[in-house]
């Protein structure tokens, strides 16, 4: 007989005191999020990852978010072609940091839920409750082909994801043994010990962009990432998303991603963006990435030609996300606008994280503190 346990509460209420949560995105991969040929682009090696994780931890950053990637996008740089599997990466960094939350980004169809649940609990206990999970229900056909796995029809991916995370929640919460007999998963006499740290469960996020993806995130997750479009479009989408969550008794934090190029002057920042994008973009890799995005992402398919052109250019500096380019005051103003548009947080990258983060830490974070959007580390 199944022995029910109290449903574990999410850590979202204790995750961060900051009104605008900030995290570094994509540092587990070569080139990070910048599809550029500049020689100083991010290495992605372990020593640089560890040093950056510890710098961000000491600075009071809220989270690290990796990308789940199994092969590169080709081009001159084979963009993101070298990288760390994100759960073991998170485990290693959690063991050597103190406060920051570190996520793993996991493709649900590629990892059995019993193995996944055990990996996540192990990592969570290593980090004493600082582990988070980013669920990907489907994405890159090239990568799925490597595994010999055929992607399901779009909405069916989220139906599978619902069973997958539902089974993991049960493994985190129930003493077992129990059975799972769904449309996709058939598990018998499941047992799973130990449980997550401290009688709570990890924060769970998803970046589904379609109607089915948003519904999945609202029903199953604590954080929902939305593609960057514009302040006006995203503000309306954020309001609709949080209202839909509230109608279902859920409190969802909406996040977006982008890149930061911050220099002492606006001119220096814009000149560096020109160097990264206009002089050194890896256009072959960018166009392959766009092709995959159009096939797998409803937001890309519905974008106008002008929006696609803008995303193509932004991919060279930050994977198509929200650009924040300028002096510290300009970057702070852009972050204030994100907060006013209803975003709970921002995950961002630099061309070279280690070179650029210290200036951001010293100049941008104190300004956000003075505005009341961040607390002192």
Image (cartoon, grey):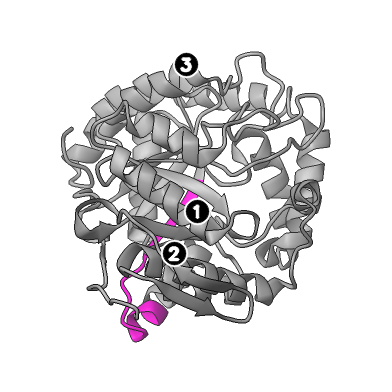
- Residue drawn 68% across and 48% down? 310
Residue 264 visible in this rendered orientation of the protein = no
Does the stretch in magenta take in 253? yes
Q: Is residue 273 left or right of residue 282?
A: left
The circle on residue 116 is 1
Residue in the foreground of this view, choosing between 105 and 187: 187
Quarter placement of the N terminus: bottom left
Label 3 crowd (10 A; few <14 / some 14-19 / many >=20): few
Would you name the residue on which mark 3 appears?
A: 47
Q: Image height check: is 36 above or below 190?
A: above
Q: Quadrant of residue 328?
A: top left
Q: Residue furthest bottom?
A: 247
Label 1 crowd (10 A; few <14 / some 14-19 / many >=20): some
Residue 227 appears at what percent x and percent y? Answer: 56, 57
Asked whether the residues under the numbered discs 1 and 3 touch, taking CB atoms below 8 Å apart as contact, a structural biologist would say no
Q: How many marks?
A: 3
The circle on residue 168 is 2
Range shown magenta = 243-257
- Residue drawn 55% across and 20% down? 45
Q: Between tags 1 and 3, which lies in front? A: 1
Q: Quadrant of residue 251?
A: bottom left
Residue 203 appears at what percent x and percent y? Answer: 35, 56
Between the residue at mark 1 and the residue at mark 3, the CA separation in whole angstroms equals 26 Å
Does the stretch in magenta take in 188? no
Between the residue at mark 1 and the residue at mark 2, the CA separation in whole angstroms equals 8 Å
- Residue drawn 47% across and 77% down? 179
Q: Between tags 2 and 3, which lies in front? A: 2
């Amino acid at each position: 007989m199944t022995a029910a346990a109290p449903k574990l509460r999410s850590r979202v209420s204790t995750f961060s005191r900051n009104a605008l949560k900030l995290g570094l995105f994509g540092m587990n991969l070569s080139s990070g999020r910048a599809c550029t040929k500049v020689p100083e682009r991010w290495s992605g090696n372990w020593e640089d990852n560890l040093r950056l994780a510890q710098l961000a931890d000491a600075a009071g950053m809220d989270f690290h978010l990796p990308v789940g990637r199994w092969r590169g996008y080709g081009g001159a740089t084979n963009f993101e072609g070298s990288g760390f599997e994100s759960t073991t990466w998170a485990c290693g960094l959690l063991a050597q940091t103190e406060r920051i939350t570190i996520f793993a980004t996991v493709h649900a169809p590629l990892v059995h839920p019993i193995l996944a649940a055990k990996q996540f609990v192990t990592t969570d206990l290593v980090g004493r409750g600082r582990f988070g999970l980013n669920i990907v229900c489907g994405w890159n056909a090239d990568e799925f082909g490597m595994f010999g796995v055929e992607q399901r029809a779009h909405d069916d991916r989220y139906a599978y994801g619902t069973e997958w995370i539902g089974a993991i929640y049960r493994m985190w919460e129930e003493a077992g043994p129990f059975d799972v007999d769904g449309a996709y998963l058939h598990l018998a006499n499941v047992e799973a010990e130990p449980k997550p740290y401290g009688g709570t469960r990890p924060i769970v996020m998803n970046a589904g962009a379609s109607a089915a993806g948003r519904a999945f995130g609202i029903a199953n997750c604590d954080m929902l990432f939305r593609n960057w479009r514009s302040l006006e479009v995203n503000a309306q989408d954020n309001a609709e998303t949080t209202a839909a969550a509230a109608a279902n008794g859920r409190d969802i934090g909406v996040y977006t991603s982008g890149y930061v190029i911050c220099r002492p002057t606006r001119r220096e920042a814009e000149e560096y963006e020109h160097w990264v994008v206009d002089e050194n973009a890896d256009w072959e890799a960018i166009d392959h990435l766009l092709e995959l995005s159009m096939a797998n992402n409803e937001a890309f398919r519905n974008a106008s030609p002008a929006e696609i052109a803008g995303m193509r250019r932004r991919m060279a500096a930050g994977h198509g996300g929200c650009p924040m380019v300028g002096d510290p005051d300009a970057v702070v103003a852009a972050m204030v606008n994100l907060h006013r548009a209803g975003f709970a947080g921002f995950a961002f990258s630099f061309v070279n994280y280690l070179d650029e983060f210290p200036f951001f830490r010293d100049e941008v974070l104190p300004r956000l503190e003075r505005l009341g959007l961040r607390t002192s580390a």
